[in-house]
Image: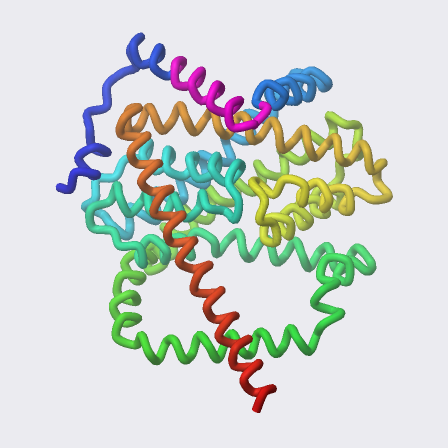
Amino acid sequence: MSTEQAVVAAPHGRFHLHRLLIFALVIVVIGAAAVLFGWDISGWFKHLWDTITSISLGYVLAAIVLVTVQTTTTAMAWYSILRFGYPNSNVRWIEVLACYSAAVALNSVLPANLGTLTMLLMYTSIIVAATFAGILAGFAVQKIFYSLIGTAGYIYLFLTVGGSFDVQFKLITEHTLATVILLAAGAMLVFLVARVLRERIKEWWQDAKVGGQVLVHPRAYFGRVVFPEAISWVGGLGIIAVFLAAYNIPVSFHTIMRVVAGNSIANVTSVTPGGAGVTQGFNVLSLKGITSASNANAYSIAQQLVVTAWGLLFAIVVVVRAFGWTGGKTLVSKSYGQAREKSSEQSAARKAKREARHHAGTTGDAV
């Protein structure tokens, strides 16, 4: 067993007073550091408090319950995927929940969904037999339901809201030829890379088949993966409905689906932490004609603040419960460091390709 795995596998005792004191001290230190680095954390908490007190406490509590249901049911789907892929791993439910909740929390404060990449590396760390390719395949399996239901949401939006396709994909409709060329070039690039890495891809495919093993058992897939994910998705709709009602915005299936589609596009296109700013813009657009822009913006900010705050608190508690303070801190920090390295490598590779294409084009013009 590696040193990292030994840290993660440390004994899990009950909470003690000294751990709570350490936890409180860490919060104080983080707050002080945030102030030194220029983050107005007191202003953030004041904004959060003003938001919470501006609406009924019942709405806030209902949202917290639904966020918890949404997180735990998706983690349950992940647990089933990992248990079928690595049946001898002895991975515990609380550990899977801790890794997933940490990813949700990190995605709310980090750009470009780095939390998801961190989660994949965390799963690789806590499961001895797991490979990154296998965990990535598990991620693809976990996304099947959400991709299908998300596509259905887009289709509903485009069929029921005139001109929504042009609004959401204006860039594509205005540059159709460039989009087609980009997709064709991307497909050709993937084909050429696949030929070069043929042997490695065969190895990755074997690892991937392990991570997606639950698909071989349709009953288990639908009962232990799709079903909890469906509950999670309904919980997400409930969160939107709760905050719409809190701001006196008419709650209907049509309104909720408009917001869902807008949020989905915002998450895909945003590079800001948690989609901040971009999400608000899409929410205002989605609720145009239903409520005022200022009220739609207030709704969106309130939802993001409450969901983010509870997600962070829930993640800290569950990670400490699953791995202890030291083990949890080591696992998250190492996985996040590796995620940043992978992200930097991918960005550098894309930049090198762009520079190579630019250089080739310049050379061609000179000739």
Q: Nearer the viewer, residue 326 or 230?
A: 326
Residue 301 point in image, percent of width and height: 68, 32
Residue 130 visible: yes
Position of 14 relative to 220 (above/below): above
Residue 252 point in image, percent of width and height: 75, 39
Residue at left offset 69%, top offset 15% = 53
Residue at left offset 70%, top offset 17% = 56
Specify how the rendered protein is coloured: rainbow
Position of 23 relative to 171 (above/below): above
Q: Nearer the viewer, residue 187 or 353?
A: 353
Q: Quadrant of residue 11?
A: top left
Q: Quadrant of residue 309?
A: top right
Q: Which residue range is magenta in the image?
A: 24-40
**Number of marks:** 0
Taking the image as shown, residue 101 lies to the left or right of residue 4, namely right
Taking the image as shown, residue 109 lies to the left or right of residue 152, namely left
Residue at left offset 63%, top offset 77% = 180
User: Residue lying farthest top?
Assistant: 17
Quadrant assignment for the C terminus:
bottom right
Position of 169 relative to 227 (above/below): below
252 in the magenta segment? no
Taking the image as shown, residue 270 lies to the left or right of residue 292, namely left
Residue 268 point in image, percent of width and height: 59, 53
Question: Magenta stretch: dominant SS?
Answer: helix
Q: Quadrant of residue 362?
A: bottom right
Residue at left offset 25%, top offset 68% = 203
Quadrant assignment for the N terminus:
top left
Residue 296 point in image, percent of width and height: 77, 36
Residue 141 visible: no
